Amino acid sequence: MGRYVARRLLLMVPVLLGVSLLVFFLTNLLPGDPARAAAGRLATPEQLSAVRERLGLDRPLPVQYGLYMSRLVQGDFGTSLTSKQAVARELRLFFPATIELLLATMVIVVAVGIPLGVRTATARGGWFDRAFLGFSYMGVGIPVFFLALLLQLIFAGWLRVLPIAGRLGLETVPPPMLTGMYTVDALFAGQWATLVDAARHLVLPAMTLAVAGIAEVGRITRSSMLTVLEQDYVRTARAKGLSERTVWLRHALPNAMLPTTTVIGLQVAFLLGGTVLIENLFSWGGLGTYAWTGIFRLDIPVIMGITLISTVAYLFVNLGVDLIYTRLDPRIEYE
Amino acid sequence: MLIRIIRRRRTPSQCWVGARSPAICCAIILVALSSLVSCGPKAARTHVVLLTEGIPPTLDPVAALDSRVDNPVINLYSALVQYAPGTTDLRHDLAASYEVSPDNRRYIFTLRDDVVFHDRSPVGAADVKYAVDRMLALKIGVWAYLTPVSGAEVLDTHRVALDLFAPFPGLLGALTRLYIGNATAIREHEFNGDFGQRWLQANDAGSGPYRLVSFQPGQQFTLERFPEYHGGWAGEHIESAVFRVIREEAARRIALVNGDADWIYLSSADTLEALSTEPGIQVNRDPTLNQLYIGMNTRSEHLSDPRVRRALALAYDYEGHIKYLMRGNAELAYGVLPARAECASPDAPRSRMNLAEAKRLIAEVGIQPGEVELTMAFEGTTGETPIFEIMRAGAEQLGIRVSAVDIEWDAKVENYALPETSTDLGTIWLFAPGPEAHHYLYTLVHSTQAGGGGNNFAWYQNPTMDALLDEAAEELDPDRRCELYREVETLWLADTPFAIGVTMVGLSAQRDNLKGYSVSLGHPLTQNLYPMWRE
């Protein structure tokens, strides 16, 4: 297993190289001038050429790429052309916010989606099963921005039980930075009021993002459970006199979890790149917001940084999913 | 079944896989979490909450050309002179007095001696010189309004001279955007010759009425009253304020109605109308100097003929824009200028749709229906899509197709840096620092403003126009200046480098106990906290 993990980690290097190469050259194909983005829109031609020279933008693209990569291996993602801040510093600021939202979303997806899938599989054809199928169609089909506005209207507008946007209340001071995730940092700092406030702010954006995931995970769990419940070993378990709950949870569910795990992995990957709209709707201040501004300002170091960090996260999620397979099904072995 | 569900809901341990209704359990969890509302920290409401749409990319005062930046900066910094709140009347700010040299090329400012920065260090002539030097070196942001300034000289600790290349009657108005920062503090944080840009992105070095408490990029910034502010704190004022960015207007509206916000920015007339009937809410319709123009690329193959440009300008439904899109919350320009601009005259020809004349011009040029297809750049994210739709509908009447290039402002400016990447048509809202006609006309149609990030989206170049604009820029006699600008207008209307759209009316809504809100024509889309108070 250790050798497998080491090999997978090594394989990430060419993948990252490929992604960085692709993004670097594609970004440079976009219309616009990064030197002007850095120098300001009213910069004189002399200033532009000075900036171009300082940033190495006057050199051939392969050389620029080589310089970028040589700095990258030292942990230097470059400097944002517009904010003049180190991209690594800004990523440390924005990435944890997205991870926090993503984790909260996945907790909801797993905690609700899997039980729903199991429950509907074991009560196939009943009203609850039919209601869930209806919900799953709606969950997958409903536009996320519409759902966000709907939830904001219901929970922040009518019921007034949840905050409408932001990561913290207006008067709540962020906890001392440890991970950058307010809930986690508040927990470690023992700031319970801040923890509650941060958790409340997480609910609406996480619920919005989770609805489609719950629908997908629920449906795939239901489908897998239905297949597994027909298997001989399940029949044997029942014949041994085990309770239905034990049969479902101990014998059927672990075997039904393989496809569910794959879908969960895909959901994480989707959410890594799919939070842009939600972050903007909820003023979340995460990677999505950062990506939005970086892309529209043609801030190449920012775009590169976001792409690479998202790719690394995606690769680790993939690796994690593959490793979970071995825990779920001992027959699976990696060489 | 109902009885069974209710019974099960009473047993928390059954909120698990085997429960009959996980959905109901989830609802219980949600309600439980929501019930924590009362445990969470409630805003004490000792300050006001303002919800805006735009994220300030930086707090650097040199970037205050951008209204998203001007918004925090007008509260954090002071300038030599400033507009009185809600007016275009200039008053002294850091300056106690000023005198002008006989040749009108040198302005000597005497500074107040009682002004301190937020770190309590005194404001002096060296700080003004540094602000000028910094702007001239960086050549970004507010430099666009102050290009006639050649430099500054410290005469003594509280006297500083500003030198000009040529007389510039618009100087004082433009100086309202030259915010003076703490030179010592900024120098301490310079990095690789960046004149402190990196540090100022999230820090405050001003002497304005409010100081920065926190800045969370992409989310919000918090300001609090600076007790030593030189303007004093007599009367009622706001203690502190949070500016939070919420892009979605519907969310801002909910927050206002719920009492979670005191003031919100609006872009939709529909929302304004809906809010106007809400109890405890006051809606604001503020006149502005913000003028919409639609640039027509004179280098474009099809638009090189002024008759085609004129035809397109005549095909735009100005009345429809005001009446249906803005529900009356916009105005027609006076000639080429907004109604409140210097030299704007109600007698000037106003933009009108005239399809018959437009069709006649197109026929005269010999364009066949479907023969011409144009591209139009606009910002869909800031509500400009209907402007494109109106233009497209009008052009269709002429047999000209217009396709959309929905693009953000920064990228649009990038595209307009070169003729080959410029679209045929492109929207531009001009947010001038004051009512001087120079800021509109020179910026839009002087040949030096074409490309390279300038606002001349038409790529219009006409030596006669340049000569008129140069002469007007230096003319100190207001009557003669207006005569020159009327000649500019005549030339403009003949060549039609831009269609002159509508003048924006600033829309916002607020709790009715918030008082003193006033919009300065020279600082569009900003919220100046100093005159505000809560009743």
Image: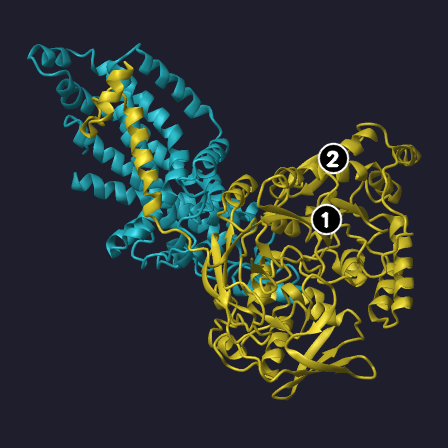
Residue linked to disc 1 = B504
Q: Which residue is identified by label 2?
A: B324
Chain A drawn colour: cyan
Residue B346 spot, x, y in % from top left: 88, 52
Compare marks 2 and 1 and give the one earlier in the sequence.
Answer: 2
Number of marks in picture: 2
Using residue A28 as the reference point, say whether residue B269 is left or right of it.
right
SS of the residue under disc 2: helix
Residue B435 rendering spot, x and y as whole percentages: 77, 61
Left or right for B46, reference B380:
left
Q: B209 or B434, which is in the foreground? A: B209
Residue shown at 27%/44% (left/top)? A9
Q: Is residue A333 visible?
A: no
Q: Chain of mark 2?
A: B
Kindly identify the amino acid type of the residue bearing the numbered disc 2.
Answer: Tyr
Residue at left 51%, top 71%? B226
Side (left or right) of B383 relative to A131: right
Give the vertical position of B377 relative to B136 (above or below): above
Asked if marks 2 and 1 fall on the same chain, the answer is yes
Q: Quadrant of the N terminus of chain B?
A: top left
Q: Callout 2: 10 Å neighbours few (<14), some, many (20+)?
A: few
Q: Which mark is residue B283?
A: none
Q: Residue furthest bottom?
A: B156
Q: Where does the image place residue B71, in percent across and percent down from the top left? A: 59, 59
Please name the residue shown 67% across and 67% down the image.
Answer: B143
Determine the residue located farthest toward the left in the rendered image: A240
Q: Quadrant of residue A89?
A: bottom left
Q: From what the image shows, is residue B100 above or below residue A250?
A: below
Q: Amino acid at mark 1?
A: Met
Tell me where residue A113 sits by quadrant: top left
Disc 2 versus disc 1: distance between alpha carbons? 14 Å
